[in-house]
Amino acid sequence: MPRFDIPARIIEQIQLVHGIFLLTVKAPAILESAGPGQFCMLEVKYHNSRDPLLRRPLSIYKTLANGRISFLYKEVGKGTRLLSKRCPGEIVRILGPLGQGFRLIRDRPCILVGGGLGIASLLLLAEKIKQSGKLIILLGAGNASEIPTIEDFSRLTRDFHIATEDGSLGQKGMVTDLLAQTLQKIKGMAQIYTCGPWPMMKAVYYMARNKNIPCQVSLEATMACGIGLCLGCAVPRSDSQGFLHVCREGPVFDADQVNWEYSQ
């Protein structure tokens, strides 16, 4: 699968809510090769500075006309703080698309379960599923402000549900509460896709396993290179035969490959 290390011009940088940004760049080569669940490594340093030296991994959130792609991200440290200050017209170097993305299953209802900014890896997948299959979207967060792009998902299906822990939007509770309700209604085989905090994905996996429903998970990990050289994004395998490397073999895995008792 081709990947590119290219200079990309920033088209737009929007602060959606406090600490959450939508960055759009022009990168037609990456767009043409990108699939749902893949990511890019973005250079965050300014000009000739060497700090921070390492790039930051961001899921490809949206693909647009004229070679544009968007990244939905949260300011969590120095690197993303510097990235959030970049302006339209500036150049950011991008390596991608990287990783193994979601595998589409088209012959059954597909349930997408997203938690917090984990939704960033699910939109392209939802758009693909919508073209030829039944799509159910379940999103969860602590409060309404933590999911500022609801309309991107809600327009794709009528079977859209949201939960917030404080009840500020949708049902009060956890997204796994929504999943439990959904699984009670599903007849026959289904497919689950999920991305979000580790405890949420762990709960989703066990719920899926109890119903014998296959589940794909998109894992998040700290990584330095994004191409499998540094081996810093290792997660233990469920069969105790070593490790899965999120950047090279993932970020998407069949959930039963992962040792969910591992504490991140």
Image: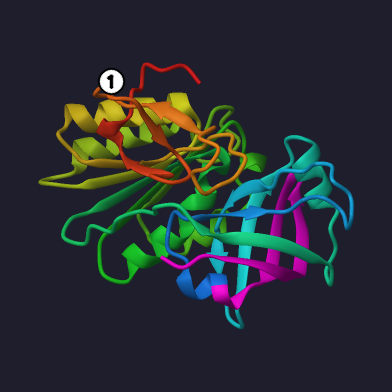
Q: Which residue is mark 1?
A: 240
Q: Residue furthest bottom?
A: 66
Name the residue nearer the viewer: 218 or 204: 218
Q: Is residue 245 left or right of residue 93?
A: left
- Secondary structure character of the magenta stretch overall: strand
Residue 262 sits in which quadrant?
top left
Residue 224 in the magenta stretch? The answer is no
Q: Is residue 79 left or right of residue 144?
A: right
Q: What residue sits 33% from the left and 36% below the top?
A: 179
Q: Residue furthest left?
A: 188
Q: What residue sits 59% from the left and 31% below the top?
A: 142
Residue 19 in the magenta stretch? The answer is yes
Amino acid marked by disc 1 = Ser
Q: Is residue 12 above or below residue 112?
A: below
Q: Is residue 190 left or right of residue 199?
A: left
The answer to whether residue 18 is seen in the rendering is: no
Q: Is residue 84 left or right of residue 172?
A: right
Q: Residue 135 appears at what percent x and percent y?
A: 31, 57
